[in-house]
Image (cartoon, rainbow, N blue to C red):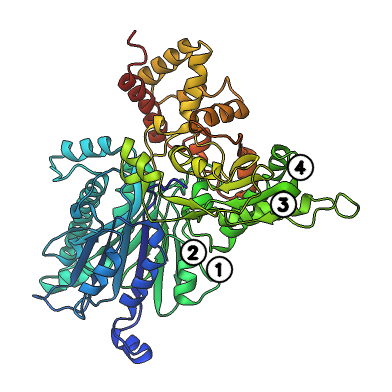
Amino acid sequence: MEQLKHECGVAMIRLLKPLSYYEQKYGTNRYGLNKLYLMMEKQHNRGQEGAGIACVNLNAPAGEEYMFRQRAEGKDAITEIFKQVNDTFAGQLYMGHLRYSTTGKHGLQYVHPFLRRNNWRAKNLCLCGNFNMTNIDEVFHFLTSQGQSPRVYGDAYITLELMGHRLDREVERIFLEAKEQGLSGIDITNYIDNHVSMANVLKTTMPHFDGGYVMCGLTGSGEMFAVRDPWGIRPAFWYQDDEVVVLASERPVIQTCFNLQAEDIQELQPGQALIVNRNSIGIHTIVPPSGDERGASCSFERIYFSRGSDRDIYQERKRLGEQLTPSIMKAIGEDVANTVFSYIPNTAEVAFYGMTDGIRKSLPRGGKSEVADVRIEKVVWKDIKLRTFISDGAERNDLAAHVYDITYGSLRPYEDNLVIIDDSIVRGTTLKESIFKILDRLHPKKIVMVSSSPQIRYPDYYGIDLSHLEELCAFRAAIALINERGMQRMLYDIYRKCKSDPTAANHVRAIYSPFTVEEINRKIVEMLRPDGMQAPIELVFQSIDGLHRACPRHPGDWYFTGRYPTPGGIRLCNEAFVSYVEKTGLFDN
């Protein structure tokens, strides 16, 4: 419901045959470029603030461009980019990126890919990624302590400079090796191009970083690589045949673009890199995987971010909806005959199917008590494409009030309950300013607002622009309960621990410990209920256990539990609470 600026999308293609092969077989020398376009469009959901592409032509003679890049801003960036490229934008290696800002920084200079130029082909580096680093201060200090002076302070630029520095050292190592073998001139260049080890570069770069990432890159000498963080927080999938090697953020993208089955595609595992060079295609362990065999793969990818067309994600979202059946039945007093079931478009649709399946299975069969069927209606429409996250305060509230509309006559006034499911409830802005107000016009007997995810209690620091605790309605509800019950001393103790020892543990978790989920639910309703609303409201959230039953292979649940997988996440959460306290002047008196 409340659009989040979230994980970016990546796409990569390495052609394994001469360009003439694709022109003869597919009738175009733009085969790779066309596939890149399709892969990016299929991931448009992952980035609507900007996009960029890059290409390397290994056959370009000296004196001609061999590494190309094109970038654009805005929701139509993909179309704009591919309109601008021509036949000179052709090669064997292609890389694309779709951007959502995770830092609030805007402008073409922040749009991926980022490019580091050099007269040596092997030292040219083009980088993009789906990532957010939590320890960029430390990496910046590491670079400056070596005498470097990065031009821009940002995780993408600093990653580029650190990796570029390590690439320079690797090229120089191979140069000395070539000299020792008696090579000279162009023979040294050819030797470097054929022997540079991107695995060495990544092994001396990526251990410096704390965060969630899929980092992708191309070099001028023909290295293509993608490396996944050791926790497996961010997703990546790849496929190889005798014509291409491809990688994308989502599995169905590769399936659709190359007409494949799910089993044909492999997932890049935590800490691994896919590296393709002139001579080989291989999987390398770059950073030892962390945690158990499942890592900390992001569960929110399954609930919301990734497209629901993935075979496994579709079933997981249905299970998330179906598992809520007992709580929903309790909320409506099992009065299915006088209840309408609906959903908030568009990402909650699959969970809605699971929810209604669960309700049907729970109905008694035979006898006078039998209900004919579950009543479903499309009650809410997403009326216009307004992005409520682009503004703050009053501007956001005014936009939120006009994003949705309702289907008049879809309920029997004062007779029907309305059960309506969404994938998540984050800030509550849209509920308060729009959804609850317009639903009340239908005069439901009761509104049961259902979330297929648990209460979002903590910020994310691995790729979503959601870093302020006070944005979260569950956090605001817990603070309100603490104040009502005179428990401010507990807040002060938490503040003191966060400030004095921010890396020992996530001290913010203690804020929620005195309260049940139901107590926080009731306070959220009280806070979000618009003035003058008539219908009673009840919230139903997914449980943590239910989340893990539905998504057993994706245990990353820090949004809901505060169990951050990396030290950087723990530290930033504690620092966010310190910032909240000091910004609000909570203890000034």
Report the amino acid beneath label 3: Gly
Is tag 1's residue or tag 4's residue first in the polypeptide sequence? 1
Most foreground residue, 377 or 107: 377
Q: Position of residue 257 (x, y in %)?
A: 44, 74
The C terminus - image quarter: top left
Amino acid at circle 4: Glu
Q: Which mark, residue 334?
A: 4
Residue that sits furthest to the left in the current view: 63
| Residue carrying label 1 | 262
Residue that mark 2 sits on:
251
Nearer the observer, disc 1 or disc 3? 3
Q: What's the amino acid at mark 1?
A: Ala
Q: Mark 4 or mark 3, which is nearer the start of the sequence? A: 4
Q: Amino acid at mark 2?
A: Arg
Q: Secondary structure at mark 1?
A: helix
Residue 24 against residue 255 in the figure, above or below: below
* Residue occupied by mark 3: 358
> With respect to residue 245, does 472 lie above or below?
above
Q: Residues within 10 Å of mark 4 (few under 14, many from 20)?
A: some
Residue under the image location 54 percent in, 26 percent down: 523
Q: Secondary structure at mark 4?
A: loop
Circle 2: is it few (<14), some (14-19), or many (20+) Cα within 10 Å? Answer: many
Q: Are marks 3 and 2 in contact (CB under 8 Å)?
A: no
**Label pair 1/2, CB-CB below 8 angstroms:** yes
